[in-house]
Image (tube, rainbow, N blue to C red):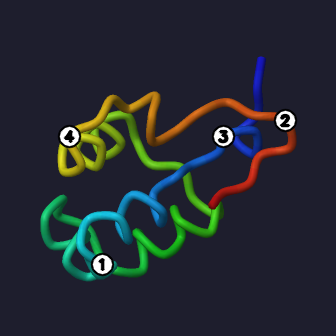
Amino acid sequence: MKSREDIRNHLRRQRLLADGMTQQDLADRVGVTRQTILSIEKGKYNPSVGLAMRLAQVFGIAVEELFELGEGGGHD
């Protein structure tokens, strides 16, 4: 079973591709704080399934395109 540290996310990349959306813009759209978005982007916090789904929905992509299991974890 993969540990929490093995989940990679592409949140920052997707956010910047969305016309330079700020962390605060994204936080407002999904109902969390900017600090939560920052923590997810840095790989320090993995969102709940519901939040992951809301994040993916903002970008019009599948959750699997935003989060993936990977060797050694990390983020981009």
Badge 1 density bin: few <14, some 14–19, many ≥20, Cα 10 Å? few
Query: Which of pointers 4 and 2 indicates the residue nearer the eye?
Result: 4
Lower position in the chain sequence, tag 4 or tag 3: 3
Residue tagged 3: 7
Disc 3 marks a residue whose amino acid type is: Ile
CA gap between label 1 and label 2 equals 29 Å
Task: Give x and y (percent) for residue 38.
Answer: 48, 75
Badge 2 density bin: few <14, some 14–19, many ≥20, Cα 10 Å? few
Residue tagged 1: 20
- Badge 4 vs badge 2, beta-carbon distance below 8 Å: no
For this view, does 9 lie left or right of residue 60? right
Lower position in the chain sequence, tag 1 or tag 4: 1
Q: Secondary structure at mark 2?
A: loop
Residue tagged 4: 60
Location of residue 2 with respect to 55 vertically, above or below = above
CA gap between label 3 and label 1 equals 24 Å
Q: Secondary structure at mark 1?
A: loop
Disc 4 marks a residue whose amino acid type is: Gly
Residue tagged 2: 71
